[in-house]
Image (spheres, rainbow, N blue to C red):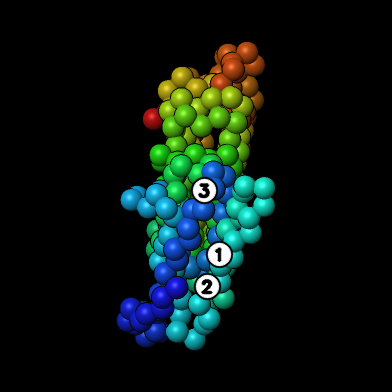
């Protein structure tokens, strides 16, 4: 573990904490990441066959370094990362300007089957999970923007992406199999769910003040419900809840 100064941001000292967790032969893991009120990016680990995870975690000079722990039982690890605290970012417009005081960059071993939970009190959350093995994703932020890019060839996946005020984007990968669920929600920002061509879907889309934009290949059942003609009989499908209090809600084909 290494701590070093990286300079000043908004007249505050920002330090970094380096994470390097050995793999120890693990094949499945749960990752529970709480960045306080900072930004977090999670993606795949490159050139780190002997590691479960690595990363660089920023924290403010007056805080304690982020804490992490690993609990291993029956061949599965639970890696918990938690910030010591931070001031919550203020209410901001436009949503693209939302930003936390610190940045976490976390890289996960793509050979490990992962269950991922990521939380920020108000920063931006980006999960680029392409090329990884994923069973479940839960990401939320108090007011930042949230991006989730899912891998190809997943099956029976549950995804929740929720923000109090920013934009939400969820991209499903190709060859999504089995019964999958996507919940994408924002208190005020835009919500976009992108589906691969051909996947069957049942969609519940609502917005308080924005527009609803749903791909024309889905039949409208009622004011807020859309569905593929073959949804009931399809072996591979996704159930989508997409909602915003004020922004636009889009469910489109990539």
Mark in the foreground, 3 or 2: 3
In the image as oriented, which residue stretches furthest toward the right? 74
Residue at the image point whose x is 46% and y is 19% from the top: 198
According to the image, label 2 marks what residue? 66
According to the image, label 1 marks what residue? 81
Residue at the image point whose x is 45% and y is 84% from the top: 61
Of callouts 3 and 2, the N-terminal one: 3
Q: Looking at the image, do the residues carrying marks 1 and 3 touch, with CB atoms under 8 Å apart?
A: no
Image quarter in which the N terminus is found: bottom left
Residue at the image point whose x is 56% and y is 21% from the top: 236
Q: Looking at the image, do the residues carrying marks 1 and 2 touch, with CB atoms under 8 Å apart?
A: yes
Q: Position of residue 170 (x, y in %)?
A: 48, 41
For residue 58, above or below residue 210 = below
Mark 1–mark 2 distance (CA, rounded to whole Å): 7 Å
Label ID, residue 25: 3
Q: Can residue 98 be seen? A: no
| CA neighbours of label 1 inside 10 A, class few (<14), some (14 to 19), many (20+) | some
Question: What element does badge 2 sit on?
Answer: loop
Mark in the foreground, 1 or 3: 3
Residue at the image point whose x is 59% and y is 65% from the top: 69
Question: What element does badge 3 sit on?
Answer: loop
């Amino acid at each position: 573990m290494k701590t070093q100064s990286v300079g000043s941001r908004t007249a505050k000292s920002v330090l970094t904490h380096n994470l390097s967790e050995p793999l120890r032969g693990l094949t499945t893991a749960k990752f529970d990441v709480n960045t306080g009120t900072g930004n977090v990016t999670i993606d795949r680990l490159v050139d780190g066959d002997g590691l479960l995870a690595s990363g660089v975690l920023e924290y403010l000079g007056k805080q304690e370094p982020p804490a992490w722990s690993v609990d291993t039982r029956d061949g599965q690890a639970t890696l918990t990362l938690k910030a010591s605290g931070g001031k919550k970012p203020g209410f901001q417009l436009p949503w693209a300007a939302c930003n936390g005081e610190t940045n976490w960059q976390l890289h996960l071993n793509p050979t490990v089957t992962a269950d991922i939970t990521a939380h920020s009190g108000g920063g931006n959350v980006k999960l680029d999970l392409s090329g990884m093995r994923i069973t479940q994703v839960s990401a939320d932020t108090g007011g930042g923007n949230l991006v989730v890019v899912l891998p190809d060839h997943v099956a029976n996946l549950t995804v929740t992406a929720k923000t109090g005020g920013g934009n939400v984007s969820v991209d499903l990968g190709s060859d999504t199999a089995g019964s999958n669920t996507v919940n994408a929600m924002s208190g005020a920002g835009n919500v976009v769910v992108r589906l691969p061509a051909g996947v069957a879907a049942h969609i519940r889309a609502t917005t308080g003040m924005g527009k609803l934009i749903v791909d024309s290949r889905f039949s409208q059942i009622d004011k807020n419900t859309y569905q593929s003609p073959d949804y009931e009989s399809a072996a591979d499908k996704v159930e989508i809840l997409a909602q915003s209090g004020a922004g636009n809600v889009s469910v489109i084909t990539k």
